[in-house]
Structure formats: structure tokens, C-alpha cells
Image (cartoon, grey):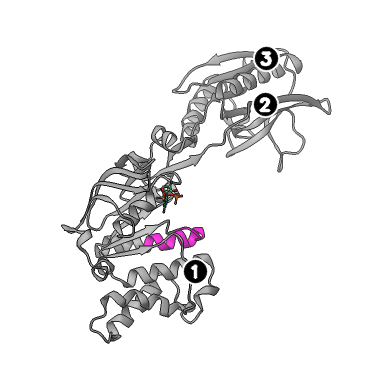
Amino acid sequence: MLAVQNLTVKYHQFTAVKGIDFEVKCGEFFGICGPNGSGKSTILRAINGISAYQGDIWLEGQNIKEFSPGERARHIAVLPQHIDLSFAFNVKEMVKMGRYAHQKGLLKSWLSKDEERVNAAMQLTSIEHLAERDITTLSGGEMQRVFLARAIVQEPQLLLLDEPTNHLDIAQQMKLLERIYHLSKSEGLTIIGIFHDLNIAGLFCDRLLMLKDGEVQTIAAPEDALNEPLLESIYESPLIRRDHPKTPAPSINMQRKVNKETMKITRKLAKGQHWEIECYPPMKFLGNQGLRNPFEWKSKILIGKPTDQQASPYVMLNIDGDFESIKWYENREGPFSGEIKIAKKHDDVQCVIVLFDGIIVETDYLKLFQIISCMIAKHIKRPIVDVPVLIGATIQEPRINFKKISSWLETALEIELK
Ligand SMILES: Nc1ncnc2c1ncn2[C@@H]1O[C@H](COP(=O)(O)OP(=O)(O)OP(=O)(O)O)[C@@H](O)[C@H]1O
């Protein structure tokens, strides 16, 4: 449908887009992602005929350089990133302007077909109730939807979206993109969209072009394009990729850099009954009471007999009685890099501590849960849920954090609580 060949765009001495090639199929939802200034909008401007370029851009086999402005408007519509308003129109008038390229003759007449298109686009973008409003009084999100409606009434073959979800709240983003996606699949509208939100791009786009410094890094389906090493090299920022829990799409998480100076682990004996261990940054824990509780981020571990378990800031290792005869056993069962430590007292399992060096996902916890349950079951006759289990995963600078916390826990249980 669209073929971009050896596209180069220069602004004076600066080359913003460097000889790139790509093709977009009819009805495809094609995303362009990349850092600020990587050349995304420049590519759209070239396709829309606003920026001068070298190379060739073909739309349905026709070189777009040969399009007249009217032809271009009938084939390509744009939702721009910045909307400057010099004149005040009401919303409906603004949307109607999108039909201009379709009106024929010197005295352009407004037909019922034009009215239908405008109404349908206003419905699609949920702006019917704003029809009479002066556009200068709209919020950023409302304005975005008005300009999208204007682009849709153009009935283009190709719709160019420059950050379409800019200014929109989460619900409006999803609504808008579902509608646009539907247009691409039901009516064969081809869409090229620029996205900063990689998760949104991964959810909706059929393929992604990843751009850096005006050069294509990859063009692939989201599951291949959004891979950790590539993203880290493009954005020069740590990112973690997981799978979306319910949809076959990648889910990208931003990762904060940890300042080692702010990592600390302290402990103190509180009320002579239990030990509090504080670790920063927090760890992800499973369980306050045996194997029953869900996952949570905690920075405080309480070892001993807690008094109030409701709304506790601690993750608790609920240990009763004397610790004198506790013995630690290390176990490396299962596909995990962490250690499973079993504390036994008089040959009965007293508690289980599992610490991971690194991030694990909740499904790993569940696998681990099964392994631990089996292990405990081999050693005890009472219900497994009675055995306190502390499962934690350290994040960021994992080795240091893991070793520290692991040794603190051991020391606290073996020596200090005797
Ligand atoms: N008219 C211009 N004159 C000079 N340089 C320009 C012009 N327009 C864009 N540039 C430069 O070209 C580069 C690419 O700009 P472009 O707007 O295409 O980036 P982008 O990837 O869309 O960025 P953003 O994500 O910030 O919108 C940037 O370095 C920008 O400063």
C-alpha cells in the first residue's frame, strides 16, 4: 500500500532521517516508536508532503510527489501532534472541514452523504455533545478527538497519527484506539501511528518500526520489536519486558536506577519479643502467614511473634518458641537461582526462607510454592499452612542486596534470637 524507499530528510546541515526503507500493507496498523528527536514526526511530515525529502514514497503504486494537494487530502489524513488554532470555529464546523477535499465544483455543495460522514465521525470519537462548542474552549483531550474526527471524515486510505493518545486519559486512549483499530480491520484503513507509550503500541500495532537517530533499528511484530536489549540500546534506559497477563502482547516496565548509597539493612529488637529487619529498596514478598497471603512489596521484615497482623507494615516470619536447636538446611530444588533454607527444630520444620537474587514473576512464585509445599510435606505431618514461609525477591543490584539480606536473616535467627 505504502512503500518508503531510501527516505532521507535534512534540515540544513542536519540529517534527521537517514535513508530508511519500509512498507506498510493495506489495513495494517503500523507503529513508529523511538526517543524524542529520533525523526518520527519527520517521517510523517515527508509522507504528508510537508517536509522536502530525498528518496521515494509510493502510495498504491503512485509516487506521492505527483499528488496535487487535493489528491493528497483525499488519500492521506493526519492527526497532528500540535494543534495551533488561529480562528475560532465550533466543533462541528471544524469536523466539516475534513470533507472539503471531497466536495466538487466551484460552488462546493454540501450533500446528505457529507452530513452522514460528519455525524458518524463525531459519534466514533464521542464528540457529538460538543457540536456547538467553540473549539478554543475545549480541553486537550476533547480537541484531540475533534481533530481525529476531522481526519476520519476525509475518508483517507492512509491515516497518519502523531501521538494520537497525547492528552487522553486511559479510558479515552483505549476507546479511541479500539475504534481506530476497528476501522483498519473492518474498512481496510491503513494507519501509521507514532507512539511513545510502548505498551499501547504493543497492544494495538500489527508491526512496529523502532527508530533511533533517524535510522531504523528493527521493523517487526511487537513481540519481537519490543525486546529488552534493543529497547535498552534505543532508549538508553533500563526497561523490563514481561508478557501482558491477559493479552498476547508484551508489557514494558520502566526501571528506576538504584543509588547504592540509599540501600540499607538495619535491625533492632522491638519490645524484647521480635526482631525488625528493614531493607531498602523493598523486596517483593509472598506471604505474611505461611503460604496463604498474596504478593506484596515490603521493606520491613518481622521475625518472631507478631502482635497485630492486620494492616501490618511488615512481612512476618511467624516463629514461636525457642530457637536454640534450629538448624539450617539448604536446598536447591527446582529451577531457581535462589536458595531455599529450611530451619528445623527437633527435626521438625520450623520455618522456610526463600530468597531470590533478581526479579521473578508471579508464575515463578507459584511454581516455587508447589516445590516448597512438596518439600515441607516430606518433612512434617501437620498442615503445610502452619509452617511460616518467607519468600522474597530482591530487585536491582540483586547480588549485593540478596547476599546482605540472606546473611542478616540467618544471623538474626541463629544467633541473636537464641
Ligand atoms: N524545522 C526543523 N529545523 C531544524 N531541525 C528540525 C526541524 N524539525 C525537526 N528538526 C530536528 O529533527 C530531529 C527529528 O525531529 P522529529 O520532530 O522528527 O523527532 P521526533 O522523533 O518526532 O521527536 P519527538 O518524539 O520529540 O516528537 C530533531 O533533532 C529535531 O530537532
For label 2, the residue is 261
Which span is picked out in magenta? 165-179
- Kindly identify the residue that appears in the image at 42 percent across and 44 percent down: 244
Q: Quick check: marks 1 and 2 in contact, CB under 8 Å?
A: no
Residue density around tag 1, few if under 14, some if 14–19, many if 20 or more, within 10 Å = many
Task: Please state the horizontal and vertical placement of residue 346, each as a whole percent of the image.
Answer: 66, 14
Q: Earlier in the sequence, mark 2 or mark 3?
A: 2
Relative height, residue 373 to residue 12 (above, below): above
For label 3, the residue is 326
Residue 324 in view here: yes
Question: Dividing the picture into quarters, in which one does residue 182 lie?
Answer: bottom left
Q: Nearer the viewer, residue 371 or 185?
A: 185
Residue type beneath disc 1: Glu
Mark pair 3, 1: CA separation: 65 Å
For label 1, the residue is 142
Quadrant of image for the N terminus: bottom left
User: Would residue 50 be found to the left or right of residue 310 on screen?
Assistant: left
Residue type beneath disc 3: Ile
Relative height, residue 83 to residue 369 (above, below): below
- Which circle marks residue 16 in the picture? none
Element assignment for label 1:
helix
Q: Quick check: marks 3 and 1 in contact, CB under 8 Å?
A: no
